[in-house]
Protein backbone atom coordinates (compact mmCIF):
# COMPACT_ATOMS: atom_id res chain seq x y z
CA UNK A 1 0.00 0.00 0.00
CA UNK A 2 2.76 2.41 1.02
CA UNK A 3 4.58 1.37 -2.13
CA UNK A 4 1.48 2.00 -4.22
CA UNK A 5 1.11 5.46 -2.68
CA UNK A 6 4.76 6.15 -3.51
CA UNK A 7 4.26 5.05 -7.11
CA UNK A 8 1.26 7.34 -7.50
CA UNK A 9 2.94 10.40 -6.02
CA UNK A 10 3.77 12.87 -8.83
CA UNK A 11 7.44 13.07 -9.72
CA UNK A 12 9.14 16.29 -8.82
CA UNK A 13 11.04 18.31 -11.40
CA UNK A 14 13.01 21.51 -11.09
CA UNK A 15 13.37 23.75 -14.13
CA UNK A 16 16.09 26.42 -13.92
CA UNK A 17 15.25 29.26 -16.31
CA UNK A 18 11.90 31.00 -16.77
CA UNK A 19 12.68 31.98 -20.36
CA UNK A 20 10.79 30.93 -23.43
CA UNK A 21 11.76 27.25 -23.46
CA UNK A 22 12.17 26.70 -19.71
CA UNK A 23 8.62 27.93 -19.13
CA UNK A 24 7.12 25.93 -22.02
CA UNK A 25 8.95 22.76 -20.97
CA UNK A 26 7.78 23.22 -17.36
CA UNK A 27 4.26 23.17 -18.78
CA UNK A 28 5.04 19.95 -20.70
CA UNK A 29 6.38 18.26 -17.55
CA UNK A 30 3.33 19.35 -15.57
CA UNK A 31 0.96 18.15 -18.30
CA UNK A 32 2.79 14.81 -18.11
CA UNK A 33 2.06 14.62 -14.39
CA UNK A 34 5.17 16.09 -12.74
CA UNK A 35 5.09 18.58 -9.91
CA UNK A 36 7.32 21.37 -11.26
CA UNK A 37 9.20 24.17 -9.52
CA UNK A 38 10.53 26.81 -11.91
CA UNK A 39 13.50 28.86 -10.81
CA UNK A 40 13.92 32.38 -12.20
CA UNK A 41 16.18 35.32 -11.44
CA UNK A 42 13.47 37.94 -11.55
CA UNK A 43 10.94 38.05 -8.70
CA UNK A 44 8.41 39.96 -10.80
CA UNK A 45 8.23 36.99 -13.17
CA UNK A 46 8.14 34.22 -10.55
CA UNK A 47 5.51 36.14 -8.57
CA UNK A 48 3.42 36.71 -11.70
CA UNK A 49 3.60 33.00 -12.52
CA UNK A 50 2.37 32.08 -9.05
CA UNK A 51 -0.38 34.68 -8.91
CA UNK A 52 -1.62 34.77 -12.53
CA UNK A 53 -0.50 31.32 -13.85
CA UNK A 54 1.19 33.19 -16.71
CA UNK A 55 4.73 34.21 -17.60
CA UNK A 56 4.17 37.82 -18.69
CA UNK A 57 7.61 38.21 -20.30
CA UNK A 58 7.64 35.14 -22.53
CA UNK A 59 4.21 33.50 -22.82
CA UNK A 60 1.62 36.05 -21.66
CA UNK A 61 -1.16 34.21 -23.51
CA UNK A 62 -0.46 30.75 -22.06
CA UNK A 63 -2.09 29.56 -18.86
CA UNK A 64 0.30 27.35 -16.92
CA UNK A 65 -1.01 24.27 -15.09
CA UNK A 66 -1.46 24.43 -11.30
CA UNK A 67 1.35 21.88 -10.97
CA UNK A 68 3.86 24.61 -11.96
CA UNK A 69 5.11 26.83 -9.15
CA UNK A 70 7.88 29.42 -9.46
CA UNK A 71 10.55 30.69 -7.07
CA UNK A 72 13.70 32.80 -7.02
CA UNK A 73 15.17 30.43 -4.41
CA UNK A 74 17.33 27.80 -6.13
CA UNK A 75 17.32 25.57 -3.02
CA UNK A 76 13.54 25.47 -3.03
CA UNK A 77 13.50 24.59 -6.73
CA UNK A 78 16.13 21.86 -6.41
CA UNK A 79 14.63 20.17 -3.34
CA UNK A 80 13.72 16.49 -3.92
CA UNK A 81 13.76 16.92 -7.71
CA UNK A 82 14.00 13.66 -9.63
CA UNK A 83 14.87 15.76 -12.70
CA UNK A 84 16.83 19.01 -12.64
CA UNK A 85 16.24 20.72 -15.95
CA UNK A 86 18.66 23.44 -17.05
CA UNK A 87 17.45 26.13 -19.46
CA UNK A 88 19.64 29.22 -19.12
CA UNK A 89 21.77 30.68 -21.94
CA UNK A 90 24.60 28.21 -22.65
CA UNK A 91 27.40 30.68 -21.93
CA UNK A 92 26.01 31.29 -18.43
CA UNK A 93 25.59 27.63 -17.48
CA UNK A 94 28.98 27.12 -15.82
CA UNK A 95 28.68 30.09 -13.46
CA UNK A 96 25.06 29.32 -12.63
CA UNK A 97 25.65 25.64 -11.96
CA UNK A 98 28.64 26.43 -9.76
CA UNK A 99 26.24 28.25 -7.44
CA UNK A 100 23.55 25.54 -7.61
CA UNK A 101 25.60 22.34 -7.39
CA UNK A 102 25.50 22.08 -3.59
CA UNK A 103 21.70 22.22 -3.68
CA UNK A 104 21.05 19.31 -6.05
CA UNK A 105 19.37 16.12 -4.86
CA UNK A 106 22.07 13.39 -4.82
CA UNK A 107 20.10 11.11 -7.18
CA UNK A 108 18.70 13.74 -9.51
CA UNK A 109 19.06 13.37 -13.28
CA UNK A 110 20.30 16.64 -14.77
CA UNK A 111 18.64 17.50 -18.06
CA UNK A 112 20.03 20.05 -20.51
CA UNK A 113 17.60 21.89 -22.79
CA UNK A 114 20.39 24.12 -24.05
CA UNK A 115 21.65 24.23 -27.64
CA UNK A 116 25.06 25.83 -27.41
CA UNK A 117 28.76 25.01 -27.06
CA UNK A 118 30.87 26.75 -24.42
CA UNK A 119 33.22 29.45 -25.68
CA UNK A 120 36.87 28.85 -24.87
CA UNK A 121 36.54 25.21 -23.78
CA UNK A 122 34.41 24.07 -26.78
CA UNK A 123 32.55 21.83 -24.34
CA UNK A 124 29.04 20.58 -24.95
CA UNK A 125 26.50 21.48 -22.28
CA UNK A 126 26.36 17.92 -20.89
CA UNK A 127 30.14 18.01 -20.47
CA UNK A 128 29.90 21.28 -18.54
CA UNK A 129 27.18 19.74 -16.37
CA UNK A 130 29.25 16.60 -15.63
CA UNK A 131 32.30 18.69 -14.80
CA UNK A 132 30.66 21.33 -12.63
CA UNK A 133 28.07 19.17 -10.87
CA UNK A 134 30.56 16.31 -10.51
CA UNK A 135 28.11 13.69 -11.75
CA UNK A 136 28.69 10.77 -14.15
CA UNK A 137 27.41 10.79 -17.75
CA UNK A 138 24.71 8.29 -16.70
CA UNK A 139 23.01 11.06 -14.70
CA UNK A 140 23.12 13.74 -17.41
CA UNK A 141 20.46 13.81 -20.12
CA UNK A 142 19.64 16.04 -23.04
CA UNK A 143 16.23 16.95 -24.42
CA UNK A 144 16.32 18.21 -27.98
CA UNK A 145 14.54 18.23 -31.35
CA UNK A 146 12.27 20.49 -33.41
CA UNK A 147 10.69 22.23 -30.43
CA UNK A 148 10.06 25.90 -31.10
CA UNK A 149 8.90 27.03 -27.67
CA UNK A 150 5.93 29.12 -28.87
CA UNK A 151 4.45 26.15 -30.70
CA UNK A 152 4.98 23.78 -27.78
CA UNK A 153 3.43 26.35 -25.41
CA UNK A 154 0.37 26.31 -27.70
CA UNK A 155 0.36 22.51 -27.25
CA UNK A 156 0.87 21.90 -30.96
CA UNK A 157 2.05 18.33 -31.66
CA UNK A 158 5.80 17.77 -31.81
CA UNK A 159 8.36 15.02 -31.35
CA UNK A 160 11.65 15.26 -29.46
CA UNK A 161 14.61 13.16 -28.34
CA UNK A 162 15.49 12.35 -24.72
CA UNK A 163 19.14 11.28 -24.81
CA UNK A 164 21.33 9.85 -22.08
CA UNK A 165 24.28 7.43 -21.94
CA UNK A 166 22.11 5.42 -19.55
CA UNK A 167 19.13 4.12 -21.52
CA UNK A 168 17.03 3.74 -18.38
CA UNK A 169 17.53 7.41 -17.48
CA UNK A 170 16.56 8.36 -21.06
CA UNK A 171 13.38 6.29 -20.69
CA UNK A 172 12.60 7.89 -17.33
CA UNK A 173 12.92 11.36 -18.89
CA UNK A 174 10.82 10.23 -21.86
CA UNK A 175 8.04 9.15 -19.53
CA UNK A 176 8.33 12.32 -17.40
CA UNK A 177 7.61 14.59 -20.39
CA UNK A 178 5.39 12.43 -22.61
CA UNK A 179 2.02 14.09 -23.25
CA UNK A 180 -0.66 13.76 -25.96
CA UNK A 181 1.02 16.63 -27.85
CA UNK A 182 4.70 16.01 -26.96
CA UNK A 183 6.24 12.74 -28.14
CA UNK A 184 9.80 12.13 -27.00
CA UNK A 185 11.89 9.28 -28.43
CA UNK A 186 14.96 7.97 -26.62
CA UNK A 187 18.58 7.84 -27.71
CA UNK A 188 21.93 7.07 -26.14
CA UNK A 189 23.81 9.27 -28.63
CA UNK A 190 24.27 12.32 -26.43
CA UNK A 191 27.12 13.73 -28.56
CA UNK A 192 25.08 13.55 -31.78
CA UNK A 193 21.95 14.98 -30.17
CA UNK A 194 23.79 17.92 -28.65
CA UNK A 195 25.77 18.71 -31.79
CA UNK A 196 22.61 18.54 -33.90
CA UNK A 197 20.98 21.13 -31.63
CA UNK A 198 23.96 23.47 -31.42
CA UNK A 199 25.09 23.43 -35.05
CA UNK A 200 21.58 23.89 -36.45
CA UNK A 201 21.57 27.32 -34.81
CA UNK A 202 24.66 28.25 -36.84
CA UNK A 203 23.10 26.94 -40.05
CA UNK A 204 19.88 28.83 -39.22
CA UNK A 205 21.93 32.02 -39.03
CA UNK A 206 23.30 31.26 -42.51
CA UNK A 207 19.83 30.56 -43.90
CA UNK A 208 18.50 33.72 -42.26
CA UNK A 209 21.31 35.74 -43.83
CA UNK A 210 20.44 34.27 -47.24
CA UNK A 211 16.76 35.10 -46.71
CA UNK A 212 17.66 38.63 -45.69
CA UNK A 213 19.71 39.00 -48.87
CA UNK A 214 16.62 38.09 -50.86
CA UNK A 215 17.86 34.66 -51.96
CA UNK A 216 15.31 31.96 -52.67
CA UNK A 217 14.47 28.37 -51.81
CA UNK A 218 17.26 26.73 -53.81
CA UNK A 219 19.80 28.63 -51.77
CA UNK A 220 17.98 27.76 -48.56
CA UNK A 221 17.75 24.04 -49.42
CA UNK A 222 21.43 23.97 -50.40
CA UNK A 223 22.49 25.57 -47.11
CA UNK A 224 20.30 23.22 -45.07
CA UNK A 225 21.56 20.11 -46.88
CA UNK A 226 25.23 21.05 -46.88
CA UNK A 227 24.81 22.35 -43.33
CA UNK A 228 23.62 18.92 -42.29
CA UNK A 229 26.58 17.38 -44.15
CA UNK A 230 29.09 19.47 -42.19
CA UNK A 231 27.27 18.79 -38.91
CA UNK A 232 27.38 15.06 -39.61
CA UNK A 233 31.06 15.26 -40.52
CA UNK A 234 31.88 16.91 -37.20
CA UNK A 235 29.65 14.50 -35.31
CA UNK A 236 31.31 11.44 -36.80
CA UNK A 237 34.75 12.80 -35.97
CA UNK A 238 33.53 13.19 -32.38
CA UNK A 239 32.13 9.67 -32.14
CA UNK A 240 28.45 10.39 -32.78
CA UNK A 241 26.17 8.05 -34.71
CA UNK A 242 25.63 9.39 -38.26
CA UNK A 243 21.97 8.28 -38.12
CA UNK A 244 21.26 10.75 -35.33
CA UNK A 245 21.71 13.59 -37.83
CA UNK A 246 18.98 12.15 -40.08
CA UNK A 247 16.61 12.17 -37.10
CA UNK A 248 14.75 14.70 -34.96
CA UNK A 249 17.88 16.12 -33.30
CA UNK A 250 19.54 16.67 -36.68
CA UNK A 251 17.39 17.09 -39.77
CA UNK A 252 14.22 17.65 -37.73
CA UNK A 253 15.50 20.59 -35.73
CA UNK A 254 17.41 22.00 -38.69
CA UNK A 255 14.28 22.13 -40.86
CA UNK A 256 12.14 23.66 -38.10
CA UNK A 257 14.68 26.31 -37.19
CA UNK A 258 15.73 27.23 -40.72
CA UNK A 259 12.15 27.64 -41.93
CA UNK A 260 10.46 29.33 -39.00
CA UNK A 261 10.08 33.06 -38.37
CA UNK A 262 9.77 32.05 -34.70
CA UNK A 263 13.45 31.04 -34.64
CA UNK A 264 15.64 33.67 -32.96
CA UNK A 265 18.72 32.44 -34.84
CA UNK A 266 16.96 32.57 -38.18
CA UNK A 267 15.59 36.04 -37.42
CA UNK A 268 19.01 37.24 -36.25
CA UNK A 269 20.52 36.09 -39.56
CA UNK A 270 17.75 37.71 -41.58
CA UNK A 271 18.47 41.07 -39.95
CA UNK A 272 22.17 40.73 -40.76
CA UNK A 273 21.37 39.73 -44.34
CA UNK A 274 19.17 42.81 -44.72
CA UNK A 275 22.18 44.94 -43.88
CA UNK A 276 21.91 45.60 -40.15
CA UNK A 277 25.21 45.70 -38.28
CA UNK A 278 25.95 43.18 -35.55
CA UNK A 279 25.33 45.80 -32.86
CA UNK A 280 22.02 46.86 -34.41
CA UNK A 281 20.95 43.23 -34.66
CA UNK A 282 21.89 42.49 -31.05
CA UNK A 283 19.95 45.58 -29.98
CA UNK A 284 16.70 44.32 -31.54
CA UNK A 285 17.13 40.73 -30.32
CA UNK A 286 15.37 40.19 -27.00
CA UNK A 287 15.99 36.50 -26.50
CA UNK A 288 18.88 34.06 -26.63
CA UNK A 289 20.19 33.33 -30.15
CA UNK A 290 22.76 30.70 -29.22
CA UNK A 291 24.37 30.42 -32.66
CA UNK A 292 25.78 33.95 -32.43
CA UNK A 293 28.34 32.90 -29.82
CA UNK A 294 28.37 29.16 -30.46
CA UNK A 295 29.40 29.55 -34.11
CA UNK A 296 32.86 30.34 -32.74
CA UNK A 297 32.97 27.30 -30.45
CA UNK A 298 31.64 25.04 -33.21
CA UNK A 299 34.44 26.28 -35.48
CA UNK A 300 36.84 25.66 -32.60
CA UNK A 301 35.56 22.06 -32.37
CA UNK A 302 35.96 21.68 -36.15
CA UNK A 303 39.59 22.78 -35.92
CA UNK A 304 40.30 20.52 -32.95
CA UNK A 305 38.89 17.54 -34.86
CA UNK A 306 40.36 18.46 -38.25
CA UNK A 307 36.96 18.81 -39.92
CA UNK A 308 36.08 21.29 -42.64
CA UNK A 309 32.92 23.32 -41.91
CA UNK A 310 32.68 25.96 -44.64
CA UNK A 311 29.21 27.25 -43.77
CA UNK A 312 30.11 27.64 -40.10
CA UNK A 313 33.34 29.37 -41.18
CA UNK A 314 31.30 31.75 -43.34
CA UNK A 315 28.91 32.57 -40.49
CA UNK A 316 31.82 33.35 -38.16
CA UNK A 317 33.25 35.63 -40.86
CA UNK A 318 30.01 37.58 -41.23
CA UNK A 319 29.01 37.72 -37.57
CA UNK A 320 32.37 38.25 -35.89
CA UNK A 321 34.84 39.47 -38.51
CA UNK A 322 32.75 42.09 -40.24
CA UNK A 323 32.73 40.32 -43.59
CA UNK A 324 29.97 41.47 -45.92
CA UNK A 325 27.39 38.74 -46.65
CA UNK A 326 27.89 39.33 -50.41
CA UNK A 327 31.66 38.80 -50.24
CA UNK A 328 31.20 35.79 -47.93
CA UNK A 329 28.69 34.22 -50.32
CA UNK A 330 31.04 34.66 -53.26
CA UNK A 331 33.83 32.95 -51.31
CA UNK A 332 31.57 30.09 -50.25
CA UNK A 333 30.48 29.47 -53.85
CA UNK A 334 34.00 29.68 -55.27
CA UNK A 335 35.41 26.85 -53.18
CA UNK A 336 36.95 24.04 -55.23
CA UNK A 337 34.52 21.59 -56.84
CA UNK A 338 34.21 18.18 -55.17
CA UNK A 339 32.06 15.04 -54.95
CA UNK A 340 28.91 15.51 -52.85
CA UNK A 341 29.96 13.13 -50.07
CA UNK A 342 33.37 14.73 -49.47
N1 LIG B 1 13.03 29.01 -27.30
C1 LIG B 1 13.04 27.89 -27.99
O1 LIG B 1 12.23 27.70 -28.90
C2 LIG B 1 14.01 26.82 -27.66
C3 LIG B 1 15.18 27.09 -26.96
N2 LIG B 1 16.07 26.09 -26.71
C4 LIG B 1 17.29 26.35 -25.97
O2 LIG B 1 16.95 26.58 -24.61
C5 LIG B 1 17.92 27.42 -24.01
C6 LIG B 1 17.21 28.55 -23.30
O3 LIG B 1 16.56 29.30 -24.30
P1 LIG B 1 15.27 30.16 -24.09
O4 LIG B 1 14.48 29.77 -22.90
O5 LIG B 1 14.54 30.11 -25.36
O6 LIG B 1 15.95 31.59 -23.89
P2 LIG B 1 15.30 32.94 -23.42
O7 LIG B 1 16.19 34.00 -23.92
O8 LIG B 1 13.86 32.95 -23.75
O9 LIG B 1 15.41 32.82 -21.83
C7 LIG B 1 16.62 32.74 -21.16
C8 LIG B 1 16.35 32.80 -19.66
O10 LIG B 1 17.61 32.81 -18.99
C9 LIG B 1 17.67 33.96 -18.16
N3 LIG B 1 19.03 34.40 -18.09
C10 LIG B 1 19.71 35.22 -18.93
N4 LIG B 1 20.96 35.40 -18.51
C11 LIG B 1 21.08 34.68 -17.38
C12 LIG B 1 22.13 34.47 -16.45
N5 LIG B 1 23.32 35.03 -16.61
N6 LIG B 1 21.89 33.66 -15.41
C13 LIG B 1 20.70 33.07 -15.23
N7 LIG B 1 19.67 33.23 -16.06
C14 LIG B 1 19.86 34.03 -17.11
C15 LIG B 1 16.74 34.98 -18.78
O11 LIG B 1 16.31 35.91 -17.81
C16 LIG B 1 15.61 34.05 -19.25
O12 LIG B 1 14.75 33.74 -18.19
C17 LIG B 1 18.85 27.89 -25.15
O13 LIG B 1 20.02 27.14 -25.11
C18 LIG B 1 18.06 27.59 -26.41
O14 LIG B 1 18.89 27.29 -27.51
C19 LIG B 1 15.85 24.82 -27.10
C20 LIG B 1 14.70 24.48 -27.77
C21 LIG B 1 13.69 25.45 -28.10
O1 LIG C 1 15.87 25.27 -30.88
C1 LIG C 1 14.85 25.76 -31.30
C2 LIG C 1 13.78 24.95 -31.93
O2 LIG C 1 14.01 23.58 -31.77
C3 LIG C 1 14.64 27.22 -31.21
O3 LIG C 1 15.45 27.87 -32.11
P1 LIG C 1 15.87 29.40 -31.85
O4 LIG C 1 16.73 29.39 -30.63
O5 LIG C 1 16.56 29.80 -33.10
O6 LIG C 1 14.59 30.16 -31.64
Image: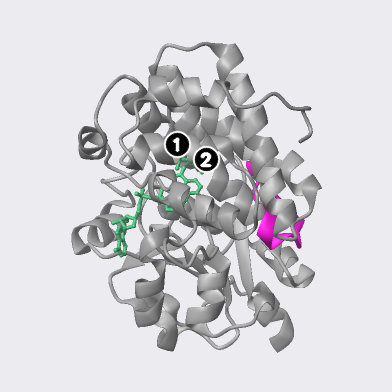
The residue carrying pointer 1 sits among few (fewer than 14), some (14 to 19) or many (20 or more) residues within 10 Å by Cα, namely: many
Circle 1: element type? helix
Front in this rendered view, residue 218 or 40: 218
Q: Residue at x 60, y 13 (%)?
A: 218
Q: Is residue 111 above or below residue 197?
A: below
- Residue 37 location (% of width, % of height): 42, 68
Circle 2: element type? helix
Q: Is residue 106 visible?
A: yes
Q: Which residue is mark 1?
A: 315
Q: Is residue 306 left or right of residue 278?
A: right
Front in this rendered view, residue 153 or 17: 17
Task: Please provide the residue range marked out in magenta.
Answer: 179-192
- Residue 327 location (% of width, % of height): 40, 22
Residue 65 within the magenta-colored segment of the rendering: no
Q: Residue at x 59, y 52 (%)?
A: 302
Contact, mark 2 vs mark 1 (Cβ under 8 Å) = yes
Q: Is residue 115 visible?
A: no
Q: Is residue 93 left or right of residue 25?
A: left
Q: Residue at x 63, y 22 (%)?
A: 222
Front in this rendered view, residue 212 or 188: 212
Question: Looking at the rendered structure, which numbered label has been put on residue 10?
Answer: none
- The quadrant in which residue 279 appears is top left
Q: Is residue 224 above or below residue 173?
A: above
Q: Quadrant of the N terminus?
A: bottom right
Amino acid sequence: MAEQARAERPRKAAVFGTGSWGTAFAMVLADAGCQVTLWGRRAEITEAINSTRRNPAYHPDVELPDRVRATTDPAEAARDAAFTVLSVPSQTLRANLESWRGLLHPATVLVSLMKGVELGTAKRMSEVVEEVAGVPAERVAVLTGPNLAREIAARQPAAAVAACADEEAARALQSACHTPYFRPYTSTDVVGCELGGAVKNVIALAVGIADGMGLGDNSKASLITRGLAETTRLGMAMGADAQTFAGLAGMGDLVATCSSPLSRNHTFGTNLGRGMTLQETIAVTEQTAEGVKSCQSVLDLARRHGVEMPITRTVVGIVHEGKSPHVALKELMSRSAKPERA
